Amino acid sequence: MNYGFLNIYWRDMIRFVRFRTMLISSLLQPALWLAFFGIAMSSSFDQLMAGVPVPTGVHAVGYLTFMAAGIIAMTTLFTSLFGGMIILFDKNWGLMREIMASPMPRDHVIIGIGLSGMTKSFIQALIIMVFGIAIGAGFFVGYWVFQIALAVLGILLFVGVFSLGFLFLSAGIAISMETPEGMQGIMMLMTMPIFFASNALYPIDAFPEFLRVISMYNPMTLLINGIRYFAIGPDFLALGKYYAYTSTDIILSFAGLLVFAVLMYAFAWWRFNKAVVT
Amino acid sequence: MAEISGEQDREIIIVKNLEYTYGDAKAVEGISFSVKKGEIFSFLGPNGAGKSTVINVLITLLALQKGEASVAGFDVTREPQKVRESIGIVFQEITLDRDMTVWEILEFHGKLYSMPHAERHARIEELIPLVQLEGKRNIRIKHLSGGMKRRLEIARGLMTRPKVLFLDEPTIGLDPQTRMRMWEYIKNVNKSGTTIFLTTHYMDEADQLSDRISIIDHGKIIITGTNWELKNTLGQDLIYLETSNNSNAIEALTNLPSVKDIKEKTKGILVMVNDDGTKVLPVMMDILREAGITISTVNLKKPSMDDVFIYYTGKEIRDEPVGKSSIISLRPGGN
């Protein structure tokens, strides 16, 4: 058994910790989203919703609680999509040659970068959860410690598979690209539809049919289903809409993410085996 | 194929009819050569001659297109993994992560090659003193000088005790003193048993370091030999003359038994002689005087690698390193 991917992981984590500005900004950015966008939107939405009666027995949550799940997903998406960028830099600075000329199988680069990106997403997700709860997001309300631990684990499981999928995609694109500008362009083009055609900030039910279908199968939506299920509960009322997730819904969402991650791995594997680095 | 495996004891790199094409541009046009176990073998040629392409094929970064190539007894196409395990590489440009420390660079490399923990750490402790980086163990690469980075790269190339060490332009961009010290390191590495394949466009580097040199230009090997063999192909001495009538002078001298060849230069002529130049020169001067040709300038010297290179490729390598002026001024002719 070759543990080369651990080596790639080790190096990428060294860089993550050493680039102080990158480290701090990547941790601060989600908190800022939550603080500014979250508070601003939730105060106006909650005012709009104030007159809407809540049926008895239904767990109603504020907008901040609703969108905090979306912010965890958004941060994971951004971090993961740009997580492969380091491969492009390594390629351009010639560092990739050392790796490509070594006996280590190439798929270990994909796995190593995937695991380190996943670790970063875990750290970010945990920070958002803690910060979100601190500013009033209603996560894990009425849970016992044991239940909270299980719920956090569930969230990390969803975040992990989702981030791996986008990290593999990012790595596959990075090894095929020539310039960071080109890669940045592609990433910008992709983030927009993935983020907005999802249930991160609003319900998708009122979307036009085609957009609704796209949004339903968007990995972003699948991830957010999971986060809300574990953080808020199987049924709740938000933005005047009643959400109810069965365990089958959640298992299907997770299966969808797994399929996505496997497909993206195949894509990255194909790109890496075609790549010529000199 | 049978002969490749039969020769592997003595010949550690064997290349036959290697061709490489980028799109429409032929970079390597049918090269054949072999490197013997334990020697320092150089590819000497200008930038763009195809040196790096050959190296990239041998180190398995580029797929072989046409021909055959084997390194350390393994075919580069059929057993690339075995080739990779047998070699060390120092790339043309610095390939070190600026934000890692000296120790981490070596550790990372050892892990890439699946070296066991204890062996890896012991090897790092051997190599750091070898390249005189003792005090720099935990210093990040961005704080090292160019020479230190190169030494670290050599240490990295040696990390896995390779059978062959590939050095692609090992002293490019270094100052003259650092270059000389690099040569010492390379020689010591070779003495301890590592075969070295290096490419360079520096004449003095090829001349002073190599056991054998191949001059390569336009993707072809022009001539191969030891530095003395190459210089001796130009004769024992070179005599440069500027005369009142160069073409008549060539005619007058060309039949002398000790004259091997005469080349016309911009202002004078270059005579290659097979005999002691100090004895031949007075004879030549007498002949020219009798033919009514006056001599304005005379220069006598031993053939240098530059002369060999110019003779075989018809051109000089332009981007010379600093500190070469003394050699340039000795060069006959002003072409």
Image: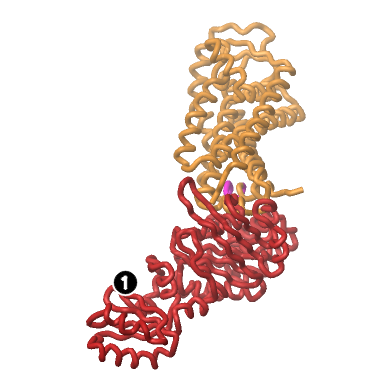
Chain colours: A orange, B red
A147 lies above or below A272: above
Which x, y percent locates residue A4? 69, 49
Which portion, as a residue range, is magenta? A13-17
A137 lies above or below B61: above
User: Going 57% across and 52% down the picture, which residue do you hit?
Assistant: A97
A237 lies above or below A109: above
Residue A225 found in image quarter: top right
Kindly tell me whether residue A123 is visible in this rendering: no
Q: Helix, strand, or loop for circle 1?
A: loop
Kindly tell me whether residue B299 is visible in this rendering: yes
| Picture quarter with the C terminus of chain B | bottom left
Which x, y percent locates residue A199? 57, 19
Identify which residue, B249 or B110, lies in the foreground: B249
Query: What chain does mark 1 sit on?
Result: B
Residue B303 found in image quarter: bottom left
Query: In the image, what residue type sits under mark 1?
Result: Asn
Residue B96 is covered by the magenta coloring = no
Drawn side of residue A229 relative to residue A34, left or right: right
| Picture quarter with the N terminus of chain B | bottom right
Residue B197 found in image quarter: bottom right
B210 lies above or below B142: below
Which x, y percent locates residue A145? 75, 30
Q: Which residue is mark 1?
A: B335
Which x, y percent locates residue A52? 56, 7
User: Going 66% across and 41% down the picture, which residue do you hit?
Assistant: A111
Main structural element of the magenta stretch: helix, strand or loop? helix
Identify which residue, B23 or B132, lies in the foreground: B23
How many residues crowd around disc 1 within 10 Å: few (fewer than 14), some, or many (20 or more)? few
